[in-house]
Amino acid sequence: MAIGYPMIQQRLHIDSGTDLTYVLQNPHSDYNPLASSSFRYRSCLGLRSASLTPGAMKGRCDFEKRGQLAGTGTLGLAPGDLSITSSFNKTFSICLGNLNRFQRTNEFLALGDGAVLSGPTVALGNLLNVTMTSIAINEQNLGLDILLSMSLTIMDTGHSALSLVSNAYHAVIGNIKEKMVAYENAYTTDYNPLLCYNGKIPKNLGINLSLGIGNVTINFPKRKLFYQMRRDVYCLIVDESVNGRNYIGIMAFQDLNVGSADEDIKSSSSEEHGIQSPEEESMNLRRAN
């Protein structure tokens, strides 16, 4: 994305968990705000943003960088006064391919009129948060419905893993460990606290985790549930949340088009846009208040 004038190309980390878009001022970005004729200061007074906290000086704000930054800055897609989506009728869509493949095609981010919006409805809150109603493994409900309904769940492309509140995490990990007993000799602590094994993701690994969100089910077959961290180690991309919230991270967005239009978040299957996912059924997601 080009930032400033004269325009300078930047590689921004797409993050649906924040409404803040920013570029770091360092040699990697080559961006100097004072050298850009389009740069303006803006007071933080009265701003509605979950990403900012009042600073020590009146009109200034502080923000906390989220996780490991990829690129030279962040493109924030969550609703808020600072969201870049406010300049595009609060409309966007994002579609990703298989993250375990080095070469991927037909992935896109669309802002404004180019966004793809279709699919069944799921209620969504201010921070792209949804109400998770169930977790099942191989169609067996783990009985976490009440616990999940009491905790906030955020659709967050800035988050890598599926992060679950403590009791839900331990229930999921315990169940998957039982199903992975044939591979326990390959267990490794290389990427603690993630559950990891030596080797490549087994082709015959029959584990499917599914999240119930209203009338929509998000499926995690093995290629969404596990990630090849390096050639000889693969890991379960589920970890324990540290703040009492559930996060549905970037792995869930594979082969799924997710978009938002002011009061509606919608999606359509990856096949509709030329992404082939033979291992998974297509699914649609939409937000409506």
Image (spheres, rainbow, N blue to C red):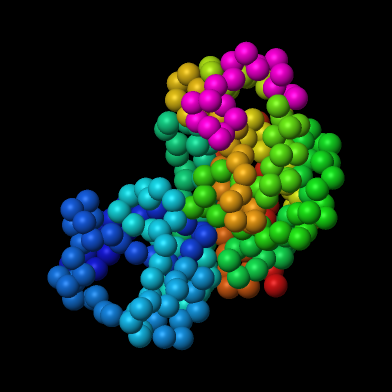
Quadrant for the N terminus, please: bottom left
Q: Kindly indicate the quadrant of the structure image that contains residue 7.
A: bottom left
Outermost residue to the front: 56
Q: Where is residue 218 drawn, in percent x and y? A: 69, 46
Magenta residues, start to end: 178-196
In this rendering, would 183 be left or right of 60?
Answer: right
Q: Residue at x 52, y 65 (%)?
A: 78
On the question of residue 190 being in view, the answer is: yes
Q: Where is residue 65 drawn, in percent x and y? A: 40, 58
Q: Is residue 256 above or below residue 1?
A: above
Q: Is residue 67 above or below residue 45?
A: above
Q: Where is residue 140 drawn, in percent x and y? A: 84, 36
Q: Kindly indicate the quadrant of the structure image that contains residue 238.
A: top right
Q: Residue at x 70, y 15 (%)?
A: 182
Q: Residue at x 15, y 70 (%)?
A: 35
On the question of residue 88 being in view, the answer is: no
Q: Is residue 88 above or below residue 205?
A: below
Between 4 and 116, the residue placed more toward the observer is 4
Between 64 and 31, the residue placed more toward the observer is 64
Magenta run includes residue 61: no
Between 255 and 239, the residue placed more toward the observer is 239
Quadrant for the C terminus, please: bottom right
Looking at the rendered structure, the number of numbered marks drawn on it comes to 0
In this rendering, would 180 be left or right of 87?
Answer: right
In this rendering, would 137 be left or right of 68?
Answer: right
Q: Where is residue 97 drawn, in percent x and y? A: 52, 40
Q: Kindly indicate the quadrant of the structure image that contains residue 278.
A: top right
Q: Is residue 154 above or below residue 255?
A: below
Q: Residue at x 39, y 81 (%)?
A: 44
